[in-house]
Image (cartoon, coloured by chain):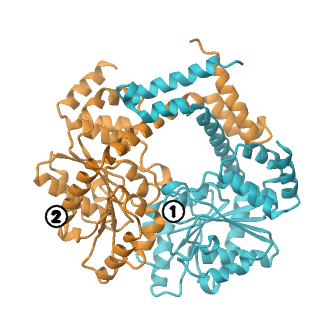
Chain colours: A orange, B cyan
Amino acid sequence: MENLDQTLLERFREGDRRSLSRLLTRIENRDPSVPEILDTLYPRTGDAWRLGVTGPPGAGKSTLVNRLVGSYRKKELPVGVIAFDPTSPFTGGALLGDRVRMETVSQDPGVFIRSMATRGHLGGLSVGVDEACDLMDAFGKERIIIETVGVGQSELEVANSADTTIVVLVPQSGDAIQAMKAGLMEIADLYILNKCDRDGADHAFRELVSTVSLKAPEDGWRPPVLRTVAEKGEGLDEVLKAIQEHRQHIIDSGSLEERRHARIAAKTKRFVEDGIRKKLWNEDRNTRRVKGLASASSPYELGEQLIDDFYEEIRHERR
Amino acid sequence: MENLDQTLLERFREGDRRSLSRLLTRIENRDPSVPEILDTLYPRTGDAWRLGVTGPPGAGKSTLVNRLVGSYRKKELPVGVIAFDPTSPFTGGALLGDRVRMETVSQDPGVFIRSMATRGHLGGLSVGVDEACDLMDAFGKERIIIETVGVGQSELEVANSADTTIVVLVPQSGDAIQAMKAGLMEIADLYILNKCDRDGADHAFRELVSTVSLKAPEDGWRPPVLRTVAEKGEGLDEVLKAIQEHRQHIIDSGSLEERRHARIAAKTKRFVEDGIRKKLWNEDRNTRRVKGLASASSPYELGEQLIDDFYEEIRHERR
């Protein structure tokens, strides 16, 4: 790597926030230097606990995340936040209001907040979310909270990047069933029914508990259902306790190791396929692909031609 | 292809529903014979109009789709339905109730209904949705309706497979803003505010209209906002009219051709990358990938090793 990068990495290791920020930007821009940088920092990763906070829009995810950050800071744990919600107060959005309160945490040097864009309008998490977590991990963050936009693929995808996945719902009839349909039951380690000062909270709670109870526990963990009013900070202690219990459980059961191995395998897969894709879709082949059927009778015949062409190119390379 | 496939294809061409069904199953199972089959049938495709129906759970998508099917059948148009919603009455689900009414359309030989599984718990459309549409198209369906589960990636992804994308919402405060957050505004060719017999429908309608009006029209098309009570069939004629207008508009503006070219390019890309992936992740390399860091210090170093290994394998193949 060039000297610039070396200096950047030194500053990063010294805890310079601007360097963290610049490296995160490189991840977002898929800068070619990223793999080597992450490779270098890789030994420093593995200590952070990664929390995914997901659930439908309007469930109060940002407010809850804000509370969690506050609680962790009281314990003097360095916290990183990656927010995908363009309307999240963390990311400067205004739709949800309460930005002011957020600023109290966002001005704390022990907290690093980064917003990332969702992938296209498909709403998937940015490709770099694991890498961004690794970077914050290497930076010394002990708690990393990933807040999804709560729609599109990101809502569920976050579970692949988190050690503990929290699904936030609100008292609303049929919400539990919708969550089930949305596949949230598959990923939840912990359910939070937020805004429990609303009418119908008790009914919604019972509905959620009974829906959750339908699902057999995985590796002996039955996701608890907790009630909060994040706005007022009510129920937060129970949430922290449950997160701690889940953490202990997956450490003891060995499923944390499984999750992390799966994450490494997935990361390797992405890295390999991205690398090959970059070589595959060079300007020439891409043009031929997009021009479509000029050269072939069907997408499948065209595809065969492009595959053969790619392999031929590799064969003709000097070893 | 083996004789079996030939017979199967003949029967398919003769309009045998069981053959269509069997070929759809092959698509879902990613059977190796699929590309060749689709390649053979490709000349028969291109006539069907593909409608995507998306929107949050509980918006009444299935009921609306049911009504659309009924209307098209009155015009004696052959209709295909691909439903991703596991709870859709079309797919035998019961959560939403009204299965009985669905059976009236599902027993009509001019209607072919197929349910497909969403991709994993990420809720993406099945990889084969375009291919399934092509198959129904080649079978002679003139209208193909794709109903999403309304959550996860599928909610937006459907736009890539549809000629006209219909976003169904219900009168609910903030629904328009949530739709905006969800990225639905990016893909809607047509908005339907369903269940307009509910309280607050007028307010929700105005809110939706004003939200929609914020977005500049694309290639001269401003997505209309229509009110329906699909349950009672109210507003359906306006919907059919708007679909027809959108169809005419994108034919005239040439953006239909663009959409279809983009679809072919995407299909080719998937086909090529799937083919290469199949060769790439052979048992050996996959094991090394999943075993993770046994052989390397980081996922990136491991990845480099696997890429080199893959290219070496190709170089050593006999031409």
Is the residue A265 above or below the residue B319 in the image? Answer: below
Q: Position of residue B20 (x, y in %)?
A: 77, 59
Question: Please, what secondary structure does the residue beneath circle 2 have?
Answer: helix
Residue at the spot 17% in from the left edge and 54% down from the top edge: A105
How many marks the image carries: the answer is 2
Residue at the spot 46% in from the left edge and 64% down from the top edge: A182
- Residue B318, quarter of picture: top right
Q: Is residue B36 left or right of residue A196?
A: right
Question: Please, what secondary structure does the residue beneath circle 1 have?
Answer: helix
- Disc 2: which residue: A237
- Residue A314, quarter of picture: top right
Q: Position of residue A70 (x, y in %)?
A: 16, 57
CA gap, disc 2 and disc 1 = 37 Å
Q: Residues within 10 Å of mark 2 (few under 14, many from 20)?
A: few
Q: Is residue B83 left or right of residue A271?
A: right
Q: Position of residue B115 (x, y in %)?
A: 64, 64
Front label number (2 vs 1): 2
Residue at the spot 63% in from the left edge and 17% down from the top edge: B316
- Disc 1: which residue: B184
Instruction: Tell which subunit mark 2 falls on.
Output: A
- Residue B290, quarter of picture: top left
Q: Amino acid at mark 2?
A: Asp
Instruction: Tell which subunit mark 1 falls on.
Output: B
